[in-house]
Amino acid sequence: MTESPSMTESPFAPLGVLEEQIVVAVLRTRGEAYGMQARREIERVTGRELSIGAVYATLDRLESKGLLTSSRVEEDGASRRLFDVTPEGARALADTRAMRERLWHGVNVRELLALARA
Amino acid sequence: MRVSEDTRLRRSLPRLPIALLRLLLPRAERDEVLADLTAEYAEHAARAGRPQARRWLWRQAIHSALPLLGWSWWRGWTGFEPRANAYRPGGSMLRNLFADARYAARRLRARPVYTLVAVLTLGLGIGGTAAVYGIARPLMFEPLPYANASEVGMFWMPGWWTEEEFLYLRGNFPGFRNVAAYRPGDATLRQGDAPARLIPGITASSELFDVLGARPFIGRGFHEGDDAQGAEPVALISYGLWQELGGQRSIIGSRLMLDGTPQTVIGVMPRGFWFPDPSIRIWHTKPLDPQGRNGSYTFVGRVAPGADVHDMGPQIQRLTEIIGDRFQYHVGADKTQNAVITPLREALVGSMRPALVATFAAMGLILLIACANVAALMLGQVEGRTSELAVRSALGATRGRLMQQLVVEAVLVGIGAGLLGAALAAAGYRLLAEALPIGAWGENASFGWSIFAAAPVVAIVAVVLVLLVPAASLWRGDLRGTLTRARTGGIQGRGGRLERGLVVAEVALAMLIASAAALLVRSVANLYAIDPGITTNGIAVVDVTSSPQMEFAPRLQKVEELVRSLGSLQGVRSVGAAMKIPLRGGGDSFGVTVEGHPEAANTFTYFRIVTRDYFQTMGIELRDGRTFDGSDQPIAPDDSTTEMAVVVNEAFVKKYFPGENPIGRRIGDGFTSPQRIVGVVSDVKEAALTDDAAPVRYYLAGQAPWFGNLATFVLRTARPGDAAAVLDAARRTVRNVAPEFAVQGTTTMERVLDTAVGPARQIMSLLSLLSALALVLGAVGIYGVISHFAARRKRDWAIRVALGLPGSRVVRQIVGQGAALVGVGIVVGAVGAVLLARLLASFLFGVGTLDPLAFAAASVALLLIGVAAASIPARRAGTVDPALVMREE
């Protein structure tokens, strides 16, 4: 039996690929999630270079949707914008993941890998 | 040590990508992002070396540019500001711009009438100017399609030279490297069984393309000897005709049936080549005859190295001596007089310049009026917003920031107007091209991207013009002072003078156009008031041509057959044919001898060969004797004893038989047969509408042993309105009855008259339209400014009305204000109008450039419209309840 989508699924799910990556990165670097930090985290994990402009534009968009929130913190005498995930953002991320899993359900990973190697 | 390392790193930081990012990043985040990037740059440099780090930073800047731009736009548009930035100073410069754009767009949306008027008026001005520019460019600014065209000149008396003169002078034109002769040479082209069609062309001597310095795109140009006696005629065709004939390279060497004889195609001229005008599609040769006296050639020559086409005095002097020694010239056709070489551009397109310049000027004026209008509207907006602007200024907005908003609003209006203008120019250029008196250039005007490209350029100019006045007002004004004054009821509102100045300027500009239009209306009315001597309504005109090789007898037989067939068409009452009809240029003219008047020798008269019912059909009245009738029997071409009947006109009688009865008198020359005058008919305008009556002899086709290959059939319809309706049937009849004839064109006598009235009529229509537009724009401007004026002084009026001033006095005062502005504008405009009228001098007939009636008409029209426009806000102000106004304030 497949899981049926819940009635209260976030309207923002599924997130775009970069959006998803950024929300995850903010989660992973929680407490020191500056724009630059999030960018480096994604680069570190994916091994792909990412421009700061794309990251900031996406961070702003996510904040305007209410999925992230930002506040100012003082660090070494400089003011920096620190991001955190809102409950709505967490829900959107969780739903995105659930959707992906539903999508992957029934795909035989072993066969897929074999196909990829062929 | 660490510090110096840091400093070195910072110094090696590439400046350009940092500057780019600094420009694009919002101010609130700029410092921290740049600090982070610098720190990361340092890491990269330490790990992989500086060149790598530099490349990394460049990649960051380049890849960030687009998302950051989008981000700025998005923030500006949505107004989103993260909570974290709540207390941080402003966004990026770009973001401000986008925010302003959004604000301006909202303001424009909120005032649709203002926006519509501004965009429409500017759009019309921009579109018109761009379209005229697009049409005028190839004629006025682009180089002619000939090599070193400045070395080429046209000889005096174009269309009057003969083959004999050309062959006598050939190779010996003093001061010229090369001279070519050409004349009109439209040819009928027959392909298979299809009816013959007419290809506009010229026949030229073999030097033509050498003189012009033009090469065919494929094939060859004329070679020496192509125009020699016995040589086979050859032809070059235009690119357009080549495309129509299949566009194959194999056309070179093939033969086309032109005028009934095969001519070898030797070349195809490149696209964009034209000579002497763009309607010409074929350039061919004809064996030149050393005795040929057909005087319809034009000479065009390339000057010898070192000679200047503008300064050929001595060489021309020498040339006139040579021809003066060899040829005899009659008075009025003396080529040794008034000899001058006209530079090619002047000769080919010079005649179109006044029309183009006048239209261009009128369009430019419309654009200026539109700019003044929008500027006045915007100024009104600035004034209306003084309180808002003052508050914002008091809260710390800089003047530059306020100016930026104004600029953004103007730019938005400019973009809208530019788009509209480009669309209008693209849609209307053809209409305009045909409305302009530029002949083949108008018919062959093709859409160029220059028309499209001109629109944004004009739009930018317009925006700058629009901004000048409100910006000056904003810059000069004391905003904070306004705030205090506004509350105390400032009666003398700021900027009134500027606004009034704009209205005066608008009226003055409108006066320019209106008076020019009035002058042309007067002059065109004068032209139409001339009696051409013929009936112009209810006459259809069919021009046909046949091959010059066609024998006289079968040609005449076909002409007579056509007269009969066309006469039997439904709705046609009578039909005549002639080799040339009135109002279409001089045509054939021959020497005349008059029995008993030896002094008549060496004089010329027009010479017409017509069919029997020609006079009745054209409405030419009989004055004495009879016209041709059944008693005039055909005369065989070799019969030189039977007498020919001649009909002459009144001018002929006046000149050769003053005070005598011409009926029964014998005249001669032109034909070997004796000729006797049988009747006198009324004068008609032979060559041009403004010509004086000229002596004419008419001969009956069939008695005269000749009928040219060009014939014009005139069909009088039973009902005057049917002339255009029979043209289709007439075309079909020609095709069926005489397939060897090509229909050159069909028209009506009314159109022939229109054409004879000439360019003045076309320019008049265009300028009348533009002056109507100018008047409307002017009225809108006056209305706007007077509305503002009335609104600004509302309190003032209210107090006066409360103190007992009757409302009608208020109305009168406000209307008076409007009328005064219009009056000043008219005076200023009249001065300029005098200058503009000079430009039109060549189109004027029967009126001076200082015609008081035209100026008065334009002034009265402007004054009436001004008063009407001012009376609307005045009435509103006069009927307002003072109590209400006082309470509002």
Image (cartoon, coloured by chain):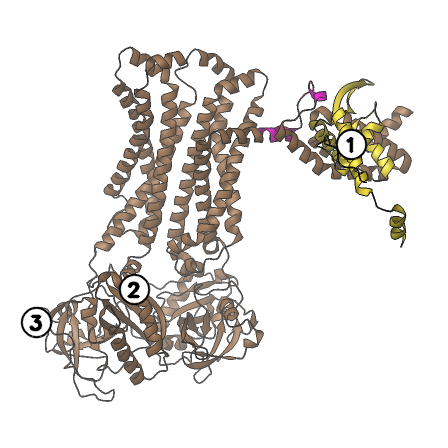
Chain colours: A yellow, B brown
Name the chain letter of the residue that bears numbered label 2.
Answer: B
For residue B601, the mark is none
Q: Amino acid at mark 3?
A: Glu
Q: Chain of mark 3?
A: B
Dot 2 or dot 3: first in sequence order is 3
Q: Residues within 10 Å of mark 2 (few under 14, many from 20)?
A: few
Residue A48 in the magenta stretch? The answer is no
Query: In the rendered image, which residue does mark 1 sit on?
Result: A93
Observer able to see residue B585: no
Q: Quadrant of the C terminus of chain B?
A: top left
Q: What kind of residue is marked 2?
A: Ala
The residue nearer to you, when weighing A76 against B210, is A76
Does the magenta segment cover residue B97? yes
Q: Is residue B445 visible?
A: yes
Quadrant of the drawing holding the N terminus of chain B: top right
Q: Please state the horizontal and vertical placement of residue B697, each as a whole percent of the image.
A: 20, 73
Q: Which residue is mark 3?
A: B660
Residue pushed farthest front? A1
Badge 3 crowding class, 10 Å Cα cut-off, few under 14, some 14 to 19, many 20 or more, is: few
Q: Where residue B725 sits in the image (x, y, percent)?
A: 29, 64
Name the residue tied to disc 2: B725
User: At which x and y percent is residue B53?
Assistant: 84, 37
- Magenta stretch bounds: B82-100
Q: Are marks 2 and 3 on the same chain?
A: yes
Q: Residue B181, relative to residue B56: is it above or below?
A: below
Question: Viewer-nearest of labels 2 and 3?
Answer: 2
